[in-house]
Image: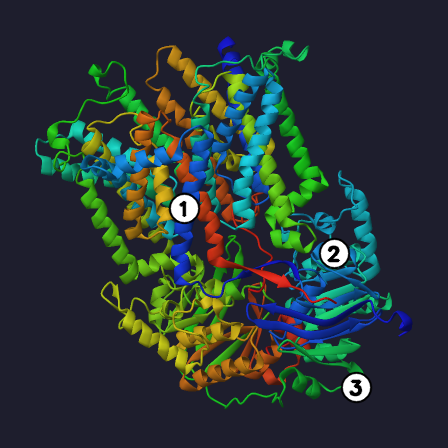
Amino acid sequence: MEMLITILSAAVRSGTPILYATLGEILTEKSGVLNLGLEGIMLIGAFTGFSVTYSTGNPWLGVLAAFIAGMCFTLIHAFLSITMGANQVVSGLALTMTGTGATSLLGRHYIGETIKGFSITPVPYLSDIPFLGPVLFNHDVLVYLSFLFVFVLAFFLNHTRFGLNLRAVGDSPRSADAAGLNVQKIRYIYTVIGGGIVAIGGAYMSVAYTKMWGDLMTAGRGWIAIALVIFAIWHPARAAFGAYLFGGVTAFQLRLQTAGTNISASLLMTLPYVLTIMVLFFISVRQGKGILFGSPAGLGQPYYREERE
Amino acid sequence: MSFQQNCCLVEMKNITKKFAGFHANDKVDFDVRPGEVHALLGENGAGKSTLMNVLCGLYFQEEGTISIENRIVELKNPKDAILNGIGMVHQHFMLVPSQTVWENMILGLDNIPQFLPKHRVIEKIKEISKKYGLHVDPEAKTWQLSIGEQQRVAILRVLYRQASVLILDEPTAVLTPQESKKLFQTVMQMRSEGHGIVFISHKLDEVMEFSDRITILRKGRKIATVETDSVTKQRLAEMMVGEKVAFSVDKPDMDPGKTVMEIDNISVLNDRGREAVRNISLELRQNEIIGVAGIAGNGQNELCEAIVGLRKPVSGKIYMFGKDLTSARPKAYISEGVRYIPADRKGTGLIPNMNINENAILKKYWQKPVSRGFRIDWRAVLDFAKAIVDKFHVDAPSMETPVRNLSGGNLQKLMLGRELKDEPNLLVAVHPTWGLDVAATTFVRETLLLERSRGASILFVSEDLSELVSISDRLAVIHGGEFMGMIDDPSSVDLETVGLMMAGTPASEIFPGGKS
Amino acid sequence: MIRGLKVEKRLYRPRWLSVLIPVSGMILALIASGFFMYLLGVSPLKAFKEVIYSALGSKYGISETIVKAVPLALAGIAVLLSFKMIIWNIGAEGQIVIGALATTAVVRYMFIDNPIVMFILMIMASCIAGGLWAAFAGYLKARWNVNEIITTLMLNYIAIHLMEHFIYGPWRDPASLGFPMTKPFPDAARLYQFADTRVHVGIIIAIILGLLFYWIFKNTRWGYEVRVIGENPRAADFAGINYVWNVVFVMFLSGAICGIAGMTEIAGLQGRLQSGFSGGFGYTAIIVAWLARLNPLSVLFVSFFMGILLVGGDTLQIVMRLPLSSTLVIQGLILFFLLGGEFFRRYRIKFITGKEQ
């Protein structure tokens, strides 16, 4: 039982950066834009968060800086994809490469340095609840912030006017256009903000999780987030579930390794990926039989007010 | 009309709109008065939709001005138009399928609070529904509604935004005659409330019956604006086309020949796994054109796809010259001489980015002389393609031109040419004249009749009843995937009856005792 | 008076544009990366000089460039095949790993002391393994429209973890002091290497495949079918082209060639299977394929160019102590400019001169 709590608690912490990235990408994809550059954006966020926290001593400034840096970096992808109508798959990959390379270059002086970052701040009263307390409420502030984000995003998408407009832009850009919405502007806004949120996920890694900088420290979490968006069927609550699942398996593997039995750990690590394929398979088969699932139609296709067929 | 001093709700002066090299609208004037129904008439390609797209903000004109109630305005995007009281119901509705009716209603409006006041919106929808007789369930998901219901939603939306000018683009294209009547009742009511209504059409009968004024466009230019009472159908047709128009088609009497294809009690599923075609039997014979009338979405596409082998029936059999082809691959059907002209040309029939040569051989590329063994002989391809282009007068800069640059008429001619090149035994044509100008339409019809004389069997699906009636030897009406009846002498039946069948009344109920 | 800009679709695309855009894009990218290096306190001119000299200035340099280019060329051709059908095979990395795994398995369990036999066995194993790995994702896509970007991506990670399982576990070289790698391969399992260089027969395979597929796409029925599917799957259906079979087959080919790439890397170059041997070139291959505009012959040239960058990157690391991933920045920038340039291939910018009303 103790072990279970430890693992679940580690799952939440380990899953948090993935959760941020997934939530950010959900926002982006809901507008109809596909952003495969998450790994690069997370690294930019991690580096910016670390370096600003290092220089100023204030982790909040670090997170803010990461958010802004993520937005600016994503702006490149937004411009190419939305205004220039470029191939979004390739653009996203280019973003990943550039982000990875740039942070490697920029971060080389920070290797080995540490910062104080965010420390664990248990929530009063809530952290004393048996089982749920240690699992959910015994973390640092960014984790709590991510809980908030899940609720806020879900509410925003389904119960606000802006959310309605966003969904329309992703589901049927032509209809949104005819209804008077500015499709390009909305896509820009949510792609860029989404990128900023992804960057926070990266910042979490360096400012709260490890409190260090390492080359390529996100270790593929950005890619996992991309898959999780679909696993979650573009819904924030399911995204949380998926993120913690992956986080849990990663944490579990680390425990196994320290316990000395790492032979089957690698095989265990394949579990989340296998699960994702299975979920995707079930969704696709059901989708083939009919109703829409909340997937933005024409995801990844640029929209121009077509001047004549 | 009693609003003389304000004259017009909308006045468009001297509007010019160009696309890559040609004038879609050339110095067009157009105005709408309050309390009138103003029809915009013209062939496909005349510039009607373009003009209205300029008015509703989707396009921006190169020259000319737009005035709303005597103030000059600039409509740079749809939002400006909506704010100025202009509402358009497009041919393809522009609703978000995954959202509910009430969500679609308020989409894009700024004066709605953030935390969606669902109940207030629904109340207002019900109010407007009642007033104009447009009934729809506000909480239904749009993709689950029928086409007629979706159109009602689109109209409701325009009224919800308090538009003073409503533009309807070919509204009856997707309706039965009965539904069209209801639509015009609504239009009349809106007219009496002082709205200005523009409806775009190419159907002379409708235009004559329901409009106060008519503006005729031809090839981007305005030919005239006339009071409906003062003009005849013949005169309208002449203005539309620019020359004297013959209304009838020259169809020689012929006895049907051998049975080419026998369709025995087939049922076909659609993409969602639901039955789109239910127990249909049909005999297709040489020298015969069988027309299929029906509202889009009642199984025509699935039926045609089954007939050409693209979709396997889940029950029943298909025989070609006696051979059982039910489970054969599409290529087998093609080899037996079955050819298909689908409804969407750029989608299914042709490949927009490939050039004329490459498109021409789409049905032939694995056969001699175009290919030898596994290689393609591009010189033979060129000959093949050129023969088609010459025979069917396809107008294109070169054989290497990507097909996306061709006009609708030329695309259709290319596709027709390709499908007919090998003198098919069975030709399935779906809306072959849709979107074509009069010259191309006449060409297509004449070609089909020639094929009929040559000995082909033709299945002709269309939504244009007058076309079907004049061309078909026999006319079937399809509804909900079943045949409501087979009319053996189409020219003798009245459109009311056909309309009833299209809406789901079987012939046995209309003519007790048997088919007409 | 200029009232604004108007973007217009081009009616025809002139040939010279197809050359001007990539070239100017690359030049702009090089200038931008030079600027970036300058900001970092590195002299761009010195950096470029080092890169060019080390990659092309000696026989060894050129051979090293080729060594880096060969797996990129192979994987690039593999990826290009699927891209021609608009199937986004992001799984090259995993397919390469699976090919390498299969190769290692053959060496371990089916060793025969004859280089030709081993060569055949290794190629067959890597082809089949890589092919099946990719075909699985292809079938899911063709039959049920399962998003191939995600499935191939997931399969990458599964493949990598599978490999780790073996090389940390049952296949680990006891003499390697805990490093994740296998024992070195026996000589018969190694590929022939030319002269004193590290260039192996992989280069021949790459060139043959490049020429072969170029010819196939231009002149054969099957090439036409593949192009039609890529352009318009519905029209392909309409023409009687079997979508499912073709997608699965092309994905199989794609994975198989990636498998060969993996095989040549470990049997030709590295001589053993070790963690991280692929160095991400499965992803770089996607860039190569795209830069080559999906033309098999161009892939050979583009991968050579990429090889220059990679060799240069190695040099920069040693000589100027820049991390290896700095070349990624240059690659990324090139892509950005090229993506932007694509826009001008399709559209034209015109100035609207409005008349005064």
Q: Nearer the viewer, residue B1 or C205?
A: C205
Q: Looking at the rendering, which quadrant does residue C313 occupy?
A: top left
The residue shown at (29%, 69%) is B378
Q: Where does the N terminus of chain B fall, quadrant-wise?
A: bottom right
In the image shown, does C118 or A142 lie closer to the viewer? A142
Q: Is residue A243 left or right of residue B44?
A: left
Q: Secondary structure at mark 2?
A: helix
Relative to C132, does residue B369 appear above or below in the rendering? below
Q: Amino acid at mark 3?
A: Ser
Residue B137 lies, with reference to residue A268, above or below; the image says below
Secondary structure under tag 1 reads helix
The residues tagged by marks 2 and 3 sit, at their Cα atoms, a distance apart of 36 Å
Residue at the spot x=53%, y=80% of the render?
Answer: B440
Toward the viewer: A95 or B486?
Answer: A95
Residue depicted at x 34% and y 52% = C245
Q: Which mark is residue B80?
A: 2
Measure the C-alpha gap from mark 3 to mark 1: 69 Å
Mark 2 crowdedness (10 Å alpha carbons): few <14, some 14-19, many ≥20: some
Residue B231 at x, y percent in the picture:
76, 86
Name the chain letter of the residue that bears numbered label 2: B
- Which chain is indicated by disc 3? B
Label 1: which residue?
C27
The quarter of the image holding the C terminus of chain B is bottom right
From the top left corner, tell me how far across and down residue A135 is, in percent. 57, 15
Q: Secondary structure at mark 3?
A: helix
Check the image and report above or below for B288 versus B120.
below
Choose mark 2 or mark 3, whichever is in front: 2
Residue at horizontal 62%, vertical 15%? A137
The amino acid on which the numbered mark 2 sits, given as a three-letter code, is: Asp
Image x and y of residue B419, in percent: 41, 74
In the drawing, what numbered circle is on residue B230?
Answer: 3
